[in-house]
Amino acid sequence: MKPMKPILRLYPSAWRRRYGEELTDLLDELPSTPATTLDLLRGAMTAQFRSLADRLAPRLVSAGGPPMPTHPLQRHPTATALVAALLLAPTLTFVGISILAYDIAVPGLAAAVDPVLAAVTAPLIVDLFLLAAPFVAFLIAALPLIGLQTQRIDGELRVTLALRARVLNVVILLLAVLVGGILVGHVVGEFLVEVPR
């Protein structure tokens, strides 16, 4: 018996009944490597979490499993999260440097970054991009997490909203909200509220 086969006992019993024989056959063909062992352990943890989630909150879907994602962004949530992160990165960098230089007042940093920030933000289009990026990144990261399905059942139109929680997308969403909130606070503080000096 291969050393990886005992790991199969870590999978839920319903999962083993359905897929155990196929996985055993596959393990007979694969070499015993640390990577394969880690994949099996990760798969066992995932199957156990899904089994627990199904017991706590049964899915209201057909026995065949959850419905397939309907639009391209739902099929590629990681790619959209990475696009959103790339879009958010310049604004996050700008806000981070500004906070360090002006709010925390790291010695010498303001003098060093003033000419660079002034040159970078001189064109109005760059300012507009830096302001819009968190909001656009939020939308791009959020779209794969939202599913809307309409069905006609017994002559009645039913709309179902499904929300998925993908860690990378949620992290980008939170960063976008944080950076956008800081920018909005800065704009409100600078342009709408007169601060006596």
Image (cartoon, helix red, strand yellow):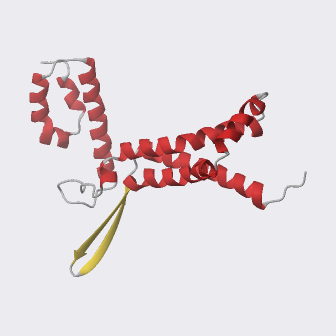
Residue at 23% x, 35% y is 11
Name above or below for residue 155 compared with residue 13.
below
- The x and y percentages for residue 186 are 71, 52
> Looking at this view, is 8 or 161 the one in front?
161
Query: Where is residue 154, by image quadrant?
Result: bottom left
Query: Where is residue 17, by image quadrant?
Result: top left
Residue at 78% x, 27% y is 108
> Looking at this view, is 80 or 36 the one in front?
80
- The x and y percentages for residue 155 are 22, 82
Name above or below for residue 53 compared with residue 16.
below
- The x and y percentages for residue 9 are 21, 30
Query: Is residue 171 left or right of 113 when viewed as pictured?
Result: left
> Looking at this view, is 68 or 100 the one in front?
100
Query: Is residue 158 left or right of 105 when viewed as pictured?
Result: left
Report how many numbered discs are placed on residues in the image.
Answer: 0
Q: Residue furthest right?
A: 197
Note whether residue 171 is visible.
Answer: no
- Which quadrant of the figure contains the N terminus? top left
Query: Where is residue 37, by image quadrant?
Result: top left
> Looking at this view, is 159 or 138 the one in front?
138
Q: Residue furthest bottom?
A: 155
- The x and y percentages for residue 81 are 42, 45
Residue at 83% x, 59% y is 194
Note whether residue 121 is visible.
Answer: yes
Name above or below for residue 65 compared with residue 29.
below
